[in-house]
Image (cartoon, rainbow, N blue to C red):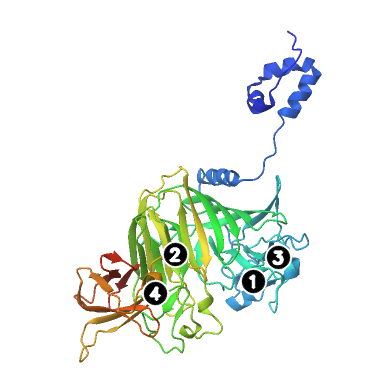
Amino acid sequence: MRLSYVVVSLRNVADSCAKLSVRAFRLARVAAPAVALFSVLCAPIAAAFTFEDVSLRAKQLADVGFKKPAGSLPKELQNLGYDQYRDIRFKTAGAYWRDANLPFELMFFHPGWHFDQPVKINEVVGQSVREIRFDPTLFDYGSNKIDPTVMRDLGFAGFRVHYPINTAGYKDEVLVFVGASYFRAVGKNQLYGLSARGLAVDTALASGEEFPRFVEFWIDRPKRSVKELTIYALLDSRRVTGAYQFVLTPGVATVLEVRARLYLRDNVGKLGLAPLTSMFFFGEVQRPRVDDYRPEVHDSDGLSVHTGTGEWIWRPLSNPQRLLVTSFAVTDPRGFGLMQRDREFRNYEDLEARYELRPSAWVEPKGSWGPGRIELVQIPVRDETNDNIVAYWVPDARPQPKHAYDFEYRLLWQKDTDTRPPSSWVTQTRRGHGYISRPNDSLGFVVEFDGPALRTRPADAKIEGVVWTDSNGQVLEQNAYRNAVTGAWRLAMRLRRNDGNKPLEVRAHLNSGSEVISETWSHIVPPE
C-alpha cells in the first residue's frame, strides 16, 4: 500500500493529529513531505501558563496524602524575635523588574521568626516559567549575627508588589503575600491594616482551626503599558488544596479580582470563603478596660453587609469578654466587608499607628453564591497586637471531597471611596447607662446616621426610629432627632436586658413615613 500524500486541515489540526494512527504514520514514512508536515503540525504546542495549570496541580495534590512541610531553618533564624526579624531588610536596589523599567516591581521577604516555611516563587514570561531563586545577597541582615553564606537556597517567605499610587515618581508597596494564605493591600493614601486570606477552615470551632497556606506562586511578567498584574497561587493544607488567580489593579481603591477552585481531601467542619481578618481593641461603643490616652484603637469598626434582597446591615465591632460568633443568613449576598468608617484623626490621636488611614476591605461576590451565611467572629484580646476579628462567607452546601468547587469575587481596599448604602448609614454608636433621674440597670444607646436621604430633608422632618430586640430585651423608650451641630440624625434608645448572662441582639433603622431611609443597625450586646 502506498500513501502518496497527507492532507491536514489547519482548522482541525488537533483532531487530525489525535486520529492519525501509528500504522498510518508508519505508512507515511515513504512520503517524506507528509512526514515533515506531520512533524510541524503535530509537534507539542507551547501554551501560556494559565489558571488551569494551577488547578491541575491542586487536583493532583488532593489525590494524594498531605505532606507536612518541614521547618528546617538554620539555627541563626530559628530564634529571631520580632525586632530582630524586622532588622533583615530587602535591598531595594535589587527590586525585581527595576532594571527592565516595568510598571510593577517585586521585593521579597526573608524566612525567619513566624515564617519558617519558605514558598516557591516563579515568573511567567510568555510561554516559559522560571523560578526566582533565593539569594542572600539581596538582603541586609542589620545587626543580626548571621552568616549569609549558610542561607543559600533557603527560599523566600513571601513577596510584595510595588506600584506608584501616590506619586508618579515612586513605586509604593501596594500588595503583600506572606504567612499561610494571608495577604493585604492598600490604595492611595492608605496604610496597611486588616488582612485577607485565601481560605478559612474550621474557624472558631472546638476542634481547632486549620490554616491552609500558599505553597507556590506564579507571577506574570507585566508589559510596560499595563496597569494590572496577574498572580497565581497554589494552596495546600491537611484537608484542602486550591488554585487561585489574583488580578491586581492598584489605585485610589486597590482592586483584586479573585478566582478560586478548591479540592477537598476530606470533609471539613466549616469552610469560610473570602475571609477578612482585622483588629478591634476599643472604640466609641466600648471604652478601654485600662487607661489609654487614645479615644479609639481599631483597624476596623464594623461589619457591613449588603444582602441579596437589597438590605444594608451594619454591625459595630466589639472586644468581648469571651468568644462571640454571630452570623447573618443570606442568599446570594451582594457584598460584605470589614470597614473603617471613622476617618477623623482626633478620634484616635495615634501619630504612629494612624488608624484613620487604615483601609476598609469590601468583598463583591461574582455569580451566584447561593444560600449561606456571613459569619463574624470576635475574640477577646488584652492589647492591639493581635487580630481578633474575622469575617467570611459560609456556603450552606459544603463542597464534596475530590470534586472541584469554584467561586469568584472582587476585593476592594478602600478609604475615600468606601462602599456604603445609597440612603444613609451609621456614623457612630455610643453606649452607656440608661439614666433617668438616678442610675438604674437599663442600657442606653445613641446611634447616629448620616447620608443623602437625611441631608435632603428639612430640620423639622418627621423621621422615626424603628427598634427591635430579641426575647432577652425590651425597648423602654426611643427617640429620633436631628443633630443640630453636625446635621446628622440621632436615634437614642433605652433598653432593658432580662438576663445579663445572655447576649442581647438589637436592631434599628430610620423611617420617613413608611419609607426606610437608613441601613439597619444590628448590635450584639455580649453577656456581662
How far apart in space, not on screen, are marks 4 and 3 (Cα)?
A: 62 Å
103 in relation to 478, above or below: above
Dot 3 or dot 2, earlier in sequence: 3
Q: Where residue 145 sits in the image (x, y, percent)?
A: 70, 76
Q: Disc 4 or disc 3, which is closer to the eye?
A: 4
**Helix, strand or loop at disc 1?**
loop
Q: Residue at x 72, y 62 (%)?
A: 96
> Which element is circle 2 on?
strand
**Residue identified by numbered label 4:** 455
Q: Which label's residue is closer to the chain start, 4 or 1?
A: 1
First-in-chain label (1 vs 3): 3
* Badge 2 amino acid: Gly
Q: CA distance from mark 4 to mark 1?
A: 32 Å
Q: Label 3 belongs to which residue?
A: 151
| Residue lying farthest to the bottom in this orientation | 438
Q: Quadrant of residue 420?
A: bottom left
Q: Is residue 410 above or below residue 419?
A: above
Mark number, residue 337: 2
Q: Residue at x 70, y 65 (%)?
A: 151
